[in-house]
Amino acid sequence: MSWNKTFKISGIVGTALCGVCLAKTCTKLVNNHNGAVCQAESSSAGEQSEKSQNMKGLTLKQVHVYFRHGARTPLHLIPGVEEVAYLKDMMLRTPPHFNFNYQVLLLPDLTPKQATSDFELHYKKTPLKGGGYAGNLTTYGEQQMFNLGLRLRRTYVDLHHFLTNEYQPEEVFVRSTNIDRTIASARCVMAGLFGKESLNKNGPVAIPVALTPDETLFPNAHVCSVVKKANHAAMIHYDKIPGIKEDREVIEKVLGYNGEKSLNFVFLRDDLIARTTHGYAIPEHIRPYMAMIEANATKILYYAMCGQHDAERPIVTRLSAGPALNIMMEGMNRMVQGQKTHKICLYSTHDSTTIALLEALDIFEGKWPPFAADICVELYQDAKGEHWVRTLYLDEEKTVRGCSGPVCRFTEFQKGLEPYVIARGAEFDKICGSQILEQIATTLVQHDSDEVETPEMEETSEIPAGM
Ligand SMILES: *[C@@H]1O[C@H](CO)[C@@H](O)[C@H](O)[C@H]1NC(C)=O
Ligand SMILES: *[C@@H]1O[C@H](CO)[C@@H](O)[C@H](O)[C@H]1NC(C)=O
């Protein structure tokens, strides 16, 4: 895709922002609107909070939750290792209480989505032994997301009395990437949060998605060549990462593999984690190498999404995570400025998104974000009208960049994140099209700017969204 085309498209993706009602079609999302959204809350969150000691006198105003989809079938199978049958009728069926009326709408115009996404067409090329295909959210994965919804209900309905007991469309924004497992994950979170009856009564629930050129919710290698170069450097040229080649050769020997293409730790891990998550044993000969596969795969993913060298990390992370962070910052700013906005914003995403967000927030601890991993960012207001932010990862309070504790002044939070937040638009396109990686790291890492892209490499570029 040309940069010009990207630029034109990105000019209108602002309508994807949480709480921003710019599009005329926005009324579709707020059709049941029946009162002021930003009215003051009567309950005090602080008194009941079990976690932070510093919550007294703070009133919850808005919550943003980014989550990774739930457990799924593998995207990649390990050559020479017997495939697991994730039985379609048993493991890929949706329990009735996880389902309700919902509508997938295409941004920016919020027209009903018609076509199957390119990602899904790609996954369907890998049929699996059990009857499903690659990347299918499993029943267990649905349960994980439902459980996340239940947890959000306990916190934001029962504990904080923040959200209305019943689903109110004007309170909730739920956005997903345009992939079946993330859309299904968003659905299951909603089912846990409000229950099927309430969702059917006040629905249909709108789940906006974007086409790949407009996508802000994963590190978008399709529209940003800097992201793509960082991605290729780790996901294709991983042998150049010190230590990877030696370990790769070890594991290939263990697997008795001598195919033409070398094996990628990220793909090995993918098959193995799908097994362990769904209760299948790891083949005995691989078991002793699980820690090594995990460590090496995590390093490759981190480098792919956040850049390989310290010098390039801020810039790659900004381009990977910045557009997703921008959606949240816009929503928070609207709330702080007293404009009409949603109370809770849910973003159904991927491990690639999660790892980039964790790095941007400076809370990445070297662990692969598990299925259903969630980052919650809560906005509060105190009695003097000042705003505060509390961040949790996997339901644990975290001290993020720019903050001195888990509860942080909004102004500090905003200042800390500012270097990482970027909207899709002219500046984003300019940096994405620049030679910045080559400039800052010529001596450190070779990027494939002049490389001719093979179909196989192109497929690898799609992986950030696919994981
Ligand atoms: C999973 O597979 C089942 C059976 O093939 C299919 O009906 C369902 O739509 C798939 N779901 C997702 C989220 O991929
Ligand atoms: C790969 O895993 C091994 C074993 O955990 C570890 O010692 C090594 O540092 C890892 N390699 C890289 C490049 O992280």
Image (tube, rainbow, N blue to C red):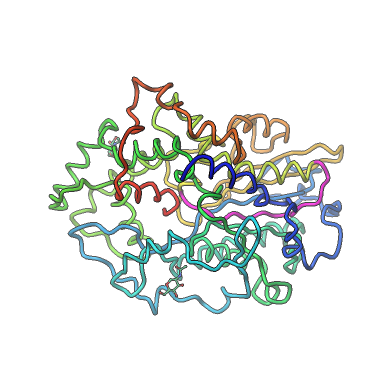
Give the total number of marks visible in the rendering: 0
Q: Does residue 360 sit above or below 122 in this rendering? A: above
Q: Residue at x 58, y 58 (%)?
A: 209
Q: Does residue 301 sit above or below 373 in this rendering? A: above
Question: Would you say residue 347 sits in the magenta stretch?
Answer: yes
Q: Does residue 120 sit above or below 291 in this rendering? A: below
Is residue 125 shown left or right of residue 25? left
Residue span colored magenta:
337-351
Question: Would you say residue 231 sits in the magenta stretch?
Answer: no
Q: Position of residue 402 (x, y in %)?
A: 63, 29
Q: Residue at x 42, y 21 (%)?
A: 439
Is residue 424 shown left or right of residue 466? right
Q: Position of residue 372 (x, y in %)?
A: 50, 57
**Which residue, as the protein is rendered here, is positioned at the far top?**
443
Is residue 88 shown left or right of residue 191? left
Q: Nearer the viewer, residue 310 or 429?
A: 429
* Residue 347 sits in quarter: bottom right
Q: Position of residue 241 (x, y in %)?
A: 29, 32
Q: Position of residue 27 (x, y in %)?
A: 76, 62
Q: Nearer the viewer, residue 314 or 437?
A: 437
**Quadrant of the rendered image holding ligand 2:** top left
* Residue 325 sits in quarter: top right
Q: Nearer the viewer, residue 10 or 421?
A: 10
